[in-house]
Amino acid sequence: MTLGEGTHTIIAVAMGVDGQEFPSAPVTFSVRLALPAPQITQPEAGSVQDMNLWIGGTGADYSAQVQLLEDFNHDDYGYSLVTLTGGWGRLFNLAPGVHSIVARQTINGRQGPVGIAHFFKVRPSRLTTVNVEILPSQEVKFSGTGHNGATVVLTYVSGPNNKPLPEVVVANGVWQISAPDWENGIYTYSAIQKVSDNAGGWIPSQDFQFSFPVSTKVPDPTNVRASADYSPIFSGNGVTGATVLIRKQDGTEAAPPAVVVNSFWSSQSRQEWGPTFDQIVQVKQRLDGQESEPGVGVVVRIAPLPPVISSLSDNELSPLIAGTCWSGAVVNLVFSDNPAVHTAAISGTEWQFRRRTEFAPGVPHTVSVTQTAAQQTSAPATRTFEIRRTLLKPVIIDPANGGEAERDLRVRGDRSVAGARMQLRVDGIDTGPATLTNGGLWYIELKGLAFGRRILDAQQTLDGRPSERSDPVVVNVVLMPPQFTTPQPGGDLPRTSTISGTGMPGARVDVWLEGRDDFLLRGYPVDSNGRWSSLVILPVGVKTLQARQAIEQVVSRDSPPLTFNVVPAAPYIETPVKDGHIGGSAVVSGFGVPGDTVSIYLGDTLLGGAPVLEDRTWSVPVTLTQPDGAHVLVAVASLDGFKSDRSAQQPVVLGRYEPSIDSPRAGSWVSHPVTFSGQGRLGTGQLVSWFNPELPWAPNLAVSAQGWHGLSVRALPAGGNWCRFQQTIVDGADASTISDWSESARFEVLDPASR
């Protein structure tokens, strides 16, 4: 007997010899059918995919969630929701390599079995930049970023000679290759990165081509510098084996010639220059009779040495400072407590100075002394000194006397003395350890003050001496309203978003929309860091939030109203795929929220729009007249006059040019191998089946100014056929890199058995 899913009750009946029936007690039980395993249909088994790919399938229940797992160890790839038709799928981002995955579905915590394993390959992302640097050694260095562990391959495309380059493995996300002995000219190379397919083969990324010039003329020295010694030392980098020439503007020698060793050179002047102001020296290097041009100009500037502070004698509150300097120099002094510049009295090589303004006692002071000679000012000589300090009566400046304050309160004040300890009292009781101050402004944190009227005062202690107590400050400790950090006033927030704010740790927050009787949040806890946040779903429109908080039996005032805009969520573009080709006519589609309207933009140009359907999909046919080349598609959702943020950018390649297919001609009869030909622009073309673009009929056909032609590489089905042709474009006439698809007229293929 087969029972359906649900609850069933059965009884057993015994029959006596006299025909009397004796039923048993009823037994009730439930029957639950086994869940079938979902089938993975996308991507195509054994195919090669980009890292960001769509994985989907069929055979799942609408109320289920489909989980994707690694075939062997069941590592979790993530979940997908199921449509009404049993289809499921979403975008996943997988690491490059070989993947074998299985799927199972879960309903109300009940898991079904895993399905048949689905195998495919994921290729690494296409390299987008290769840095090329001509080194002083005349080597060419290539470098860039890539997928960690991948192998980078640079392949010669064109140039003066075929220069093979070694392969390199990406480490810590970067790679580099260097090679010597290049001929002058412009080179073009192709760059890919590849990972192992674990079967002796490779999974390569898409190709990236780049060009660079090479010039082997003698370069100027680099990193040229001159020391500030009175006999300056010139140094820098250059080509190993070259001779560096160092000359003044009049052509005379500034320093002896130097030979470059291991890419470094240096030379010291034979003569003492002394303090020098902006002497220009020309530096070149010579190799094999050729001098570099135009040379490197280095400006030599030698400043005088710092003056000497020989004495600092104390005299009440202003010390006498004295020292030595260069004869004829001007000596200036600056003190750390005032930016004013003072000039010392000089006699020969001796100087001295005493400031009329007294220094604050008990505070370290620093004097900086410089001398000016040869139009230059020396580095400063410094000395620190201190005069006994006066202990000040502290002042509490925040909170204000008679004002309100929170339980967690930062008390700020002024007139502290550096090194003193500041002690704060609340209602005559010390509030814990004293705080060491840096002088001037100070603050002390108070936590968990009792609600009600409180009296604060402060006192500082230095070297065992207490100051006079500050004037008392009376505050009323209350529970302040919570504050919002998200959203911002007048800002935008998607329908499903997190609202957040700050409040008293341990309090509970109520949040509501103005004009609504129900609460968005009721009794929501504030964490130990004074923060709260929660996910909410809001209707589109202009909304106003308010909040309050409560702790123990104390309730705060309502927060000020916060007005903001609730806008639709940004839609998602599914097709065309990232970096995919689009022609003059295309369809842009994706996912959004039912009821929204999605508008499609190419850059800032509006292409069209369409509503989001109940199954969350949308589709917009567009006509493109922009120049061919790289472009970016974005989508914006709108509802009732409110617009979402722009979607993630979807880069595409526009190719509207259509090459021609001249043969086979319309209605002609052909036999295998079929000859194809046509016209196009310089590049490479692919001829494919009209019903399956993944099925090549004549791949990699060269397209020249005379057109293109080729033979089918496989037998075509007998009867009526069409073919499609698309080509790359490399003629440089414009930004075009790929054409649109051209379709041939119908032609007839003879059945081999009929001949």
Image (spheres, rainbow, N blue to C red):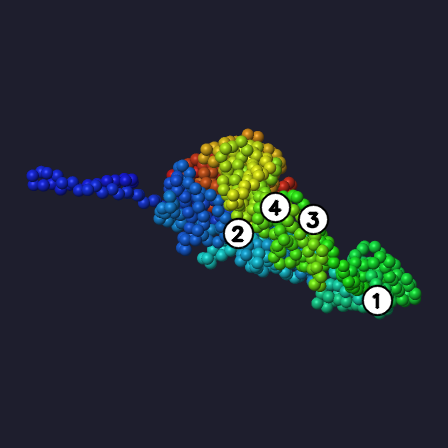
Q: Nearer the viewer, mark 4 or mark 1?
A: 4
- Kindly give the residue lying farthest to the bottom in the view shown: 270
In what quadrant of the picture does the N terminus appear? top left
**Res 264 quadrant in image:** bottom right
- Kindly give the residue lying farthest to the right in the view shown: 347
The residue at which mark 3 appears reads as 397
Question: Tag 1: residue type?
Answer: Ser
Classify mark 4: helix, strand or loop: strand
Question: Tag 3: residue type?
Answer: Ile
Q: Nearer the viewer, residue 539 or 448?
A: 448
**Residue 453 tag number:** 4
Q: Is residue 86 rendered to the left or right of residue 610? A: left
Residue 637 image offset from top left, x and y in percent: 55, 35
Cα distance, mark 4 to mark 2?
67 Å
Mark 4 or mark 1: whose residue is earlier in sequence: 1
Mark 1 or mark 3: whose residue is earlier in sequence: 1
Cα distance, mark 1 to mark 3?
39 Å
Q: Nearer the viewer, mark 2 or mark 3?
A: 3
Cα distance, mark 1 to mark 2?
74 Å
Q: Nearer the viewer, mark 4 or mark 2?
A: 4
Is 674 rendered above or below residue 159? above
Classify mark 2: helix, strand or loop: loop
Q: Nearer the viewer, residue 383 or 716?
A: 383
Q: Residues within 10 Å of mark 3 (few under 14, many from 20)?
A: some
Classify mark 3: helix, strand or loop: strand
Q: Nearer the viewer, mark 1 or mark 2?
A: 1
Q: Residues within 10 Å of mark 4 (few under 14, many from 20)?
A: some
**Res 755 quadrant in image:** top left
User: Which residue corresponds to the image point at 21% horizontal and 41% vertical from the top-left?
Assistant: 26
The residue at which mark 1 appears reads as 313
Cα distance, mark 4 to mark 1?
54 Å
